[in-house]
Image (cartoon, rainbow, N blue to C red):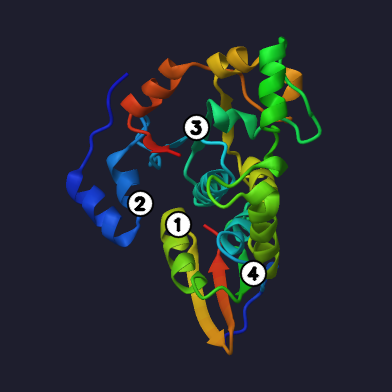
Amino acid sequence: MTVLEIAVQVDARGLSCPMPIVKTAQAVRPLASGSMVEVLSTDPGSQRDFVAWCRATGHDLVEQSTEGAVHRFIIRRK
Amino acid sequence: MTMPTFDPIAAAIADVEGVPEAFAEAFKAPNGEKQPRELVLICYSGDLEKTWASLILASTAAASGVPTKMFLTFWGLQTFVKDEVRITGQNWMQKMMSVMQRPGISHRKLSKMNFMGMGPWMMGTLAKQYGVAKPKELLEAAMALGVELMPCQMTMDMFGLTKDDMIDGMGEPVGAATVIELLANGAAPLFI
C-alpha cells in the first residue's frame, strides 16, 4: 500500500447509493487541486460508481482496493 | 445563440461507458472550454417513489459536475412546500386539495401499496436499515451541490401556493418556455 498524504477521509460505510458519491463530492469540493481523499464504502456498487464518477468529473482514481466488505478508494482532486 | 454540435458516436460511447466527458467534447462552450451537458429533471409526480428517484438522480448528477435543474410542476411542486405548512391555497377548493393530499417532502405517499401510510412507513424503515438516504436528506445534498429548483408558475397559481409556502432556496417561478429553451439548447431531459 502506497503511503499518501490524505487530506480528507470520507467514511461512507453503511450508506447506500448515491450517498457515497454525494458525500465524496461534497468533501472534495472545498479542497485544493491535487489533494488526496480516501473513501471507505460498503456499497458493492461503489466499485463501478467511483470509476465512472472519476471519469465524469476528471478526478484521478489513484487506488482502489477491497478488504472484506469494505471498498477503499484514493482519489486525487482535479 | 448557436446550437452545440452533437457527435452521435461520442454519445453512443457515453451510453455504453457512462462517460459524460464524451458529451463534454460535443458540447463546447463559446469560449472553447469544455462544458458538460446540462440535465433538466421535469418533476411532475408527487409520489414518494418517484420523488425519491428524481432526487437520487439530481444529487448524483450535481455530484458528477453536471449542471442540474429541477422543474417542479403539478404534483411534483407539492413536494417542495415546507413540511410544516399544513394547509395551502387561497380558496376553499385549493385548501381542500391540500387537506386531501398533504404537501411537503416528508408527507409523500406511495403510488402503489400506500395502505394508509403503512407502505411509506415500511419504505422508511427499510431505507434506514439499508443506509438509503431519505428524500429530505437527498434534497439537502442536491441543493448544497448546486441543483437549481425552478417552480412552475402555472402550478403555483392553480394551487394558490405562495413563495412563503415553498422551501428556502427555491428559484424564481418559470413557465414551460424556459424548460423548452433549455432542451432546445441540448439539455438532457428526464420526465419523472
Nearest to the eye among marks 3 and 2: give it: 3
| First along the sequence among labels 3 and 2 | 2
Along the line of sight, the residue nearer the viewer: B31 or B2:
B2
CA–CA distance in space, label 1 to label 2: 8 Å
Residue drawn where x is 65% and y is 65% of the image: B126
Q: Chain of mark 3?
A: B
- Read off the residue under disc 4: B130
Nearest to the eye among marks 4 and 1: give it: 4
- Read off the residue under disc 1: A58
CA–CA distance in space, label 1 to label 3: 32 Å
Q: Find out whether the residues at labels 4 and 3 contact each other: C-beta distance under 8 Å.
A: no
Say which amino acid is labelled 4.
Tyr
Residue B44: image tag: 3
Where disc 3 sits, the SS reads loop
Q: Find out whether the residues at labels 4 and 2 contact each other: C-beta distance under 8 Å.
A: no
Please state the horizontal and vertical placement of residue B23, each as a whole percent of the image: 32, 46
Please state the horizontal and vertical placement of residue B154, each as a whole percent of the image: 54, 14
Q: Is residue B175 above or below residue A29?
A: above
Q: Chain of mark 2?
A: B
